[in-house]
Image (cartoon, rainbow, N blue to C red):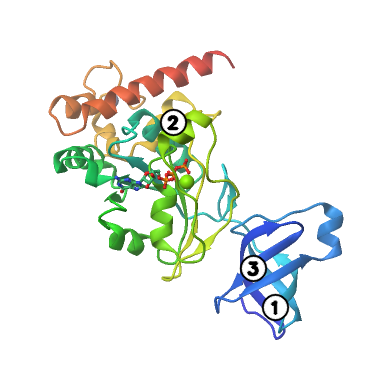
């Protein structure tokens, strides 16, 4: 895409009272309004949208958006376009990791055609062994796996590496350290962080609006409020669940039945891999729980 003289191309960082703040390739921020045709259509743009605009005022960095380029992904919580990856953050302790929620999030992220990465934070609070057994559990998925501590600065360099040139959303339960991580990764805006206990007691979150924050290595980051429950994708069918388990992909073709759900079928290579300890038992149990839930939901259609 070539940008003509007097035009800018960039990414919507945030929308705020009718204006869109667009970061161009030179890392300059433009305040953009919409052409009448977009306003008439009631069309609005999302953070993450790549747009082309015409410069109105070079000095004051004002422009008007002419065109939005096709979105390659869209996620809804929060509404952000063109997300490349979601880093699912869990704390190793305080709060304890919720692996049921993690496995559901892994499904949800992939169902939006976005890549998950796993980050276990607060490594300073636990013995190394706790982190290593989680690493062993998720290694067969092939998803990037990070162990971090914002207190010790552990794993932050690897995390930065993972963010380069991508739009990354940080998601996970409240109090795991998402905003704390983001504060180490970008200087643009210090986000509010807080104690779990205080927040849970008040039943509110410290993180609200969806906006992109630029980090110095050319990554764009999105903080999100914590949550503790997540529905599975509505249209999910029983035979599709394993599509979201790359760790089962190596074994599934060796099952006796092509349609094997890896539940109680004979000669199931996934069940055998679990018995041999090649696949994690806990994650398999959670898979069965999710499968049961999907089958029960199907019955209601
Ligand atoms: N011990 C320890 N505490 C941490 C670490 N990272 C963050 N914290 C603390 O954990 C608490 C919660 O951190 P936040 O960054 O606010 O957590 P959050 O995930 O953004 O929470 P929500 O915005 O509610 O979703 C704060 O008191 C942080 O200081 C860490 O690596 N180790
Ligand atoms: Mg936060
Ligand atoms: Zn099977």
The tag on residue 132 is none
- How many dots with numbers? 3
Residue to which mark 2 is pinned? 240
Q: Which label lies toward us, 2 or 1? A: 1
> For residue 141, what is the image quadrant?
top left
Residue to which mark 1 is pinned? 61
Q: Position of residue 68 (x, y in %)?
A: 69, 63
Q: CA distance from mark 3 to mark 1?
A: 10 Å
Q: CA distance from mark 2 to mark 3?
A: 38 Å
Q: Position of residue 295 (x, y in %)?
A: 46, 17
**64 versus 286 height, above or below:** below
Q: Which label lies toward us, 3 or 1? A: 1
Q: Earlier in the sequence, mark 2 or mark 3?
A: 3
Closer to the camera in the image, 170 or 46: 170
Q: Determine whether the residue tagged by mark 2 lies in a helix, strand or loop.
A: helix
Q: CA distance from mark 2 to mark 1?
A: 48 Å
**253 versus 139 height, above or below:** above
**5 versus 202 height, above or below:** below
**144 versus 166 height, above or below:** above
Q: Quadrant of ligand 3?
A: top left
State the quadrant of the N terminus: bottom right
- Graded by Cα atoms within 10 Å as few (under 14), some (14 to 19) or many (20 or more), the crowding at tag 2 reads few
The tag on residue 22 is 3
Closer to the camera in the image, 106 or 91: 91
Q: Earlier in the sequence, mark 2 or mark 1?
A: 1
């Amino acid at each position: 895409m070539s940008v003509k003289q007097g035009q800018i191309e960039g990414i919507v960082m945030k929308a705020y009272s009718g204006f869109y703040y667009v970061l161009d390739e030179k890392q300059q921020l433009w305040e953009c309004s919409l052409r009448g045709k977009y306003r008439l259509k009631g069309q609005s743009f999302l953070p993450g949208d790549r747009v082309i605009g015409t410069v109105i005022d070079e000095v004051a960095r004002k422009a008007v958006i002419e065109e939005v380029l096709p979105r390659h992904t869209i996620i809804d919580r929060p509404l952000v376009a063109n997300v490349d990856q979601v880093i699912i953050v869990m704390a190793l302790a305080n709060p304890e990791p919720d692996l049921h929620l993690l496995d559901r999030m892994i499904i949800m992220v992939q169902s939006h055609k976005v890549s998950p990465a796993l980050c276990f934070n607060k490594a300073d609070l636990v013995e190394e062994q706790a982190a290593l057994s989680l690493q062993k559990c998720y290694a067969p998925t092939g998803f990037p796996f990070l162990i971090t501590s914002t207190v010790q600065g552990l794993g932050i360099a690897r995390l930065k590496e993972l963010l380069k040139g991508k739009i990354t959303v940080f998601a996970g339960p409240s109090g795991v350290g998402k905003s704390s991580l983001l504060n180490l990764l970008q200087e643009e805006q210090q986000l509010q962080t807080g104690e779990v206990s205080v927040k849970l007691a008040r039943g509110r979150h410290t993180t609200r609006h969806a906006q992109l924050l630029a980090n110095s290595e050319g990554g764009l980051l999105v903080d999100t409020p914590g949550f503790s429950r997540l529905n599975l994708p509505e249209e999910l069918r029983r035979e599709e669940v394993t599509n979201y388990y790359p760790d089962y992909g190596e074994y599934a073709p060796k099952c006796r039945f092509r349609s094997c759900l890896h539940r109680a079928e004979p000669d199931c290579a996934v069940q055998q891999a679990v018995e041999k300890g090649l696949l994690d038992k806990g994650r398999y149990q959670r898979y069965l729980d999710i499968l049961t839930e999907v089958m029960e939901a199907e019955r209601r259609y």
